[in-house]
Image (cartoon, rainbow, N blue to C red):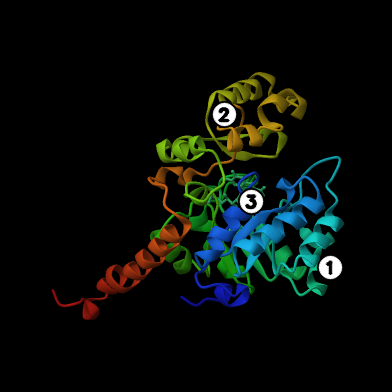
Amino acid sequence: MKTRITEMFGIEHPIIQGGMHYVGFAEMAAAVSNAGGLGIITGLTQKTPEDLANEIARCKDMTDKPFGVNITFLPTLNPPDYPAIVKAVIDGGVKVVETAGRNPSQVMPALKEAGIKVIHKCTSVRHSLKAQEIGCDAVSVDGFECGGHPGEDDVPNFILLPRAAEELEIPFVSSGGMADGRSLVASLALGAEGMNMGTRFIATKEAPVHENVKQALVAASELDTRLVMRPLRNTERVLTNEAVEKLLEKEKRLGDELKFEDIIEEVAGVYPKIMKEGEMDAGAWSCGMVAGLIHDIPTCKQLVDRIMAEAEDIIEQRLAGFQGARVPAQ
Ligand SMILES: Cc1cc2nc3c(=O)[nH]c(=O)nc-3n(C[C@H](O)[C@H](O)[C@H](O)COP(=O)(O)O)c2cc1C
């Protein structure tokens, strides 16, 4: 399958693995890239820019295919050293950067000068247009279904993707709720030129997370996510658990008085405990509604091959079959 996204990133299949905190290590990115998609290392999971440089080098040892680095701009008082992170990316010879969290204008000049393609992940048409205006090469349009931060507009992908198609000139991929060949064909029909998956890629053999996390995804249904931190306008979609229920109870009790400090126990520093130690009730961790569509733990190659085969089958059999004249003889 050839789209502007496969051409732009030099990949075989129009499937991207979005940056994920404490999941997007070199093993994850390399497995997705080796499967013909675009794997992405999560820049901020690495404690220092030097660590990121090492992670990029490790990924290069595991794949000779293109891969990217995610740079997330966090709403924090002590921002990470973004110029040093960008330098590690450029010096490491990385050709694609996924930005997220905020308009990436501060890093655009350096990335563009280095010839790096930038795909910005955002949750609204207006932010997508801003990304296009400041020179991003592509956009990841992240609907309300998504795991992680869906923004505050709550527009799901059945509306958001065609709206993006109406307005954007640069290519975009769908993001949020994507799991299989049906997701890919639907995304293409709605105007996207590929899809970005987060949660689905966690339930793969190579995902470098504790087995408990993978099993939790297989066990979860589409009803098992919750939105937390909405009162702080930093909404995050997470898998429900004891800590999340406690957090939501605090949100309800404190109302407009809620401050970040009130929920620090449930959200700060919990990722290593969950992803590495498998302590599933340690805190709130991002997870998409798509958990309801995850029923197995394949390798990344099995997953990507299955998606592409299913997509082709849908296009050639199911959809073509609806056109009377082209119904294949029974
Ligand atoms: C566990 C987890 C951690 C994530 N961490 C990040 C992150 O650090 N930066 C980022 O830009 N997106 C992050 N995301 C969002 C994903 O990159 C992707 O946009 C999202 O998962 C898409 O929705 P889906 O989960 O329905 O596929 C995270 C998602 C998950 C599930």
Which callout, 3 or 1, points to the residue nearer the camera? 3
The residue at 84%/60% (across/down) is 106
Name the disc covering residue 187, or none: none
Name the disc covering residue 110, or none: 1
* Vertical order, 327 against 102 (above or below): below
Whether tag 3 and tag 1 are in contact, CB under 8 A, the answer is: no
The residue carrying mark 3 is: 25
On the picture, is 184 further left or further right than 279? left
Instruction: Answer with the quarter of the image where residue 262 lies.
Output: top right
- Which amino acid type corresponds to the residue marked 1 in the rendered image? Ala
Mark 3 or mark 1: name the one nearer the start of the chain. Answer: 3
The image position of residue 229, as x and y in percent, is 66, 34
- Which amino acid type corresponds to the residue marked 2 in the rendered image? Glu
The image position of residue 172, as x and y in percent, is 59, 67
What whole-number distance in Å separates the C-alpha atoms at marks 2 and 3? 19 Å
Q: Residues within 10 Å of mark 2 (few under 14, many from 20)?
A: some
The residue at 57%/29% (across/down) is 279
The image position of residue 226, as x and y in percent, is 54, 34
Q: Helix, strand, or loop for circle 2?
A: loop
On the picture, is 160 further left or further right than 291? right
The residue carrying mark 2 is: 279
The residue at 83%/54% (across/down) is 82
